[in-house]
Each structure stands twice: as structure tokens, then as C-alpha cells.
Image (spheres, rainbow, N blue to C red):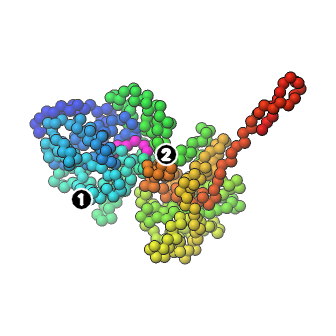
Amino acid sequence: MQFLVVIGMKIRINYRPTEKQGMYHSSTADEVLYGGAAGGGKSKATVMEALQLCLEHPNTNAYLFRKTYPELRDTLIAEAMNSIPKEIGKYNDSKKTYFLINGSELRFRYCQSENDRFKYQGAEIHWLFIDELTHFSKTVYDYLKTRLRANKRLGIKPKVRCTSNPGGVGHGWVKAYFIDIGEPFKIHERQIESKTLGKTQIKKIQYIPAYATDNPHITDDYIFELEQKPEALKKALLFGDWNVFEGQVFTEWMNSPNPERRYTHVIEPFRIPDGWHKFRSFDYGYSRPFSVGWWAVDYDGRLYRYREWYGCTGEPNVGLKLSPTEIAKGIKEREAGDGNIIGFADPSIWSKDRGESVADIMLKEGVTWLKADNDRLNGKMQVHNRLKFDENGIPMLYVFSTCKDSIRTIPNLPYSETKVEDIDTDAEDHAYDDWRYALMSRPYTPSIPIVKKQIPYPFRTNDENQGGFMTW
């Protein structure tokens, strides 16, 4: 896009998209995620795509989001001020809006907290852009999409365009929604149903990876700088690796010192021997998912998560809204044949603030709980201890491959920005919480290997003129 005709004027715009940016601009998908690595030209592509849509369709609007206003000011607004010719529009700082001469508007907005999403309750968004999507929760993303609508007279189909690097509180759900759906570049289809209309609709979703090496405007110095970063940060920012990221809490996951034994936390199910002890753990949720885990302990004290029930609709972090009675009945059905199972649960289920406690309601159905130790930092350390591989590549905790929500959520947990030693509780941490309760019931301390040292000791050897060594 070097020249653009706007209301009879031929305007020069200094923008020649890269190959990946060109794919982003020409995508026919309803929702697109662009980026995955640093330096791929995400901010430039975002502003230029918003500008193009708004100029092609008079009297429409594009909402461009970042998490905070300083981020918005220093990236998207700065890019717009630098890239949009003054002949076709004017920026109003008090309204944080770029008014174009054809009646369209680029509205720069932020959504720093979960409640900030309600500021846009009455908005009619035609083109929704979110820069650094992993900084947002799925709740915010889904809510902003509810504002995506247009009057039929405009003759447009609203779109969602996002960019992001790996990492952040939304890493898990973004990875599940855009990355894990299938191969990159390909447009994938999701079928959604409307009970109100009695119809189904196909949503087209696409992930377009881009790297600094795709961007001719990036200098070699930037690449050299990324290569010097710690391994996780380098893989995320330089290579767009969604399996590791800066701020990842449980870096022990799938990080065996023996390359041939990678991924060995996840194993295929087998019949639990009769002599192994079994127990369960529970994190309660209603509008958020609940999580029940069943564990077996072998003769070495090693834990096996052999079953789980994750109360999720299928949308990340959205609960089934089952009552305590329904959950209790579901637990009894699932552990039929397991014998007498004892469980450990979050102490909050004994609260009677709203009447009869969750624990008392479940007890009526024959499901008994003991109060778990809810020490967050010690619980986190227990997860670290159990996941860590020994020198033979063997951890003290295995997960059956059928426990898909643990496998999905545990590796994607990020650190909190405010409580830096703890995980970010805005992330999808429900399976993790039930892990903590289970592991704190059987705390494990890694043994410290005995390192044999040789120290000089002046005892006589066969050579009378030579000292000797003793092993200690």
C-alpha cells in the first residue's frame, strides 16, 4: 500500500507490507491472530489494517485495544500518528480517536482490569483489533466480541484481528483457541449454534505466524539481542514457540535432562495395582470450572493422576454451573469400584456465609472431604518438587494422557505481576489448585544426593614419601 485513493485524492502512504503482513491484510477469516514472535511488524500491521478497512467503508469504526493506556500511547497511537497522512484525518487526544475525512473513526482504547470491559457495554464495534492478546483474559475477549455488530445498511461483516507474542495471563487460552486448533496459515472452521435462531454458523479462524526475520526493517542488532536472552524468552520472542514463554511457572514440565525422555510427565493409562493407595482432590467452581483429581501412590511415593473431572463447558475457564449435589453425584459415579476414597479440598467449601456449606451438601451424597493445606507458596513448591526430573529422567509425578485439562493448563500458568512468587490467579488455575491440595497432603522433599569428596589425608601408603586421600 504505497498509494491510496480517498474521496478523489491520491494519497501516498509509506507502507509496503511484508509477505506475512500481506497475508494478514488479505485474510478472509473472521478471527485472525498475527505474530507469535517479536519484531514481526504487529503494531504497524494493526494500524494499517484498521486504516484500510475504515477508508474502504465510510462511517465505520475500528476499536484498537491494548491492556493499559501507556502501552496504547507508546505503540498503536504512536504508530498511527507516524503512519497516517494528515490529509486524510486528525487525531483528537482527549477522545483518543483518529477522525478520518470519510466519517470513519479509529478509536484507541484500553481494558486494564476485568471490569473495564463494561465501559464498552453500549459500543457498536465494526472492526475489533486487540494488540498483545495474551495480556487479556478470555472473559474480556469474549465480552468485547459481543460488541461486534453493524447496522445492515453499512453492508459490512465485522471482523476480529489480533496480534500477540507467547506469554502472559492469556497464554493458555490463546494457544488453545488459535494455535492448537491446527496448522498455521490454514483457515480453520468452528461451528457454533444459536438456540434462539435455531441455526448454525461457521466461524473461520486463522493463525499467521511472523518473525523478526520476516521484517526487512529490523536490523541485525535486534536479532543478536534476542539470541542473547534466556532460553525461554529467546524461544518465545525469536522463534514464536508457544510451548515455552518468559514468566512460565513450571518450567520443569517436559524438561527432562535426557532428550530421549522428553514429555515423560504424560503417560498412557494403565491399570492401577490393587496395593497402591488412592485419594482425590477438589477445587470448587460454579461459573468458573471446578476440578476433581484422582491420584494413586506407588510404593516409592510417586504420584499418578489417573483420572480427572474438569467442570468446563469446553470454552477455557468457563464453568458448567453445576450444584454441589450434582458434582457429588458425578464423583460417586466416576469412582465406583475404586473402594473407599478420601479427598482433600479447598477449606473455603466449609464456609457457611451463604447458608449450608458446599462440604455439608456433598456429605449428604456420601462424598467426604478433609480440609486441605492451602499454603499457596509451599503448595507451588510441592508441584516444582514433584515435576522435577532426577538424573535418570524420572519425575515424582506422572499424569495419564486422559487428564487433558491438567495437560492443557498446568504448563501455561504464568507468574503474577504483583505477587511475584505466586502464579497469576487470573489464569486458568483450577486444576493447579486441586494439584496443590493433593500434593500438600503428601509433601515430598527431594533427597539431596550424597556427593563423595576426596580430601587430602596424610596417611601412609605403599609409597612412604607420598600422602594419600580418604573418601568422605
**Residue 403 horizontal/vertical position (percent):** 54, 55
Q: Give the Cα distance between marks 2 and 1.
A: 36 Å
Magenta span includes 78: no
**Residue 232 horizontal/vertical position (percent):** 49, 39
Residue 281: quarter of image: bottom right
Quick one: 468 or 300, which is closer to the camera? 468
Q: Which residue lies furthest to the left in this view?
A: 8
Q: Residue furthest front?
A: 458
Does any portion of residue 390 appear in the rendered image?
A: yes
- Residue at the disc numbered 1: 122
What residue do we see at 25% from left, 47% from top? 108
Tag 1: residue type? Gly
Q: Quick check: 232 above or below 273?
A: above
Q: Earlier in the sequence, mark 2 or mark 1?
A: 1
**Residue 402 horizontal/vertical position (percent):** 55, 55
Residue 87: quarter of image: top left
| Quadrant where the image shows the C terminus | top right
Q: Which residue lies furthest to the top in this view?
A: 465
Extent of the magenta region: 162-167
What residue do we see at 17% from left, 51% from top? 154
Tag 2: residue type? Gln
